[in-house]
Amino acid sequence: MNEQSDPQKQLKIQKEILQVEDDLVIWIQTALDKTKYGDLEESQFRNLVRVSDTTESAEVIKNFIRYQVGRDKKWGRGKESLAEKIIEDIDGNINKKAQEIAKTCQTNFQPIWLELIRRYLGYGARHLKYKRDGAA
């Protein structure tokens, strides 16, 4: 039986992922609240979420973010930008948590990293909606 079809292992992985959801929410809310970016629309952020849902590569996700930065200033520019903070979180905090979960569950790191990135970005789309429409 491979690990993908091992229900016990999958359950343990999902339980570990649920344990870090608060961190994911806090990190993306901090990114959206404390960085510089322009009039970023919810639909533009949702495009990033869609890219994350259709790839198995963190590098593709980061490449899309950089592409968006090159197109316009809505994602911010430079070290203080939202784009840089998201990439920093993907390579730093999220990567580290995924490594910890993979080690605990004795499984492949990559699918866990992608799942955490997808959740992080999904929570970001929600928080941006709140910032744009709910907090005004």
Image: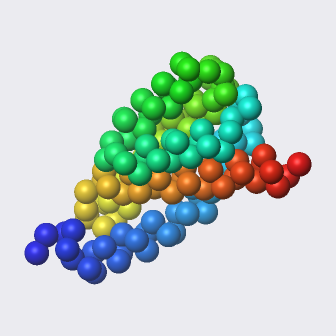
Query: Is residue 94 in view?
Result: no
Q: Nearer the viewer, residue 11 or 129?
A: 129
| Residue occupying image coordinates x 25% and y 62% | 107
| Relative image position of residue 115 (x, y in whole percent) | 41, 57
In the rendered view, how is the structure colored?
Answer: rainbow
| Relative image position of residue 88 (x, y in whole percent) | 53, 35
| Residue occupying image coordinates x 63% and y 29% | 75
Q: Is residue 46 left or right of residue 11?
A: right
Q: Nearer the viewer, residue 86 or 53?
A: 53
Q: Nearer the viewer, residue 127 or 27?
A: 127
Q: Is residue 67 left or right of residue 45?
A: left
Q: Quadrant of the N terminus?
A: bottom left
| Residue occupying image coordinates x 48% and y 24% | 67
Residue 76 location, quadrant: top right
Query: Is residue 34 in view?
Result: yes
In this view, the residue farthest toward the right is 136
| Residue occupying image coordinates x 33% and y 42% | 57
In this view, the residue farthest toward the left is 1
Residue 72 location, quadrant: top right
| Relative image position of residue 51 (x, y in whole percent) | 43, 43
Q: Quick check: 136 above or below 22?
A: above
Q: How many marks?
A: 0
Q: Quick check: 14 above or below 113?
A: below
| Relative image position of residue 64 (x, y in whole percent) | 45, 32
In this view, the residue farthest toward the bottom is 8
In this view, the residue farthest toward the front is 43
Q: Quick check: 4 above or below 11?
A: above
Q: Quick check: 60 above or below 96?
A: above
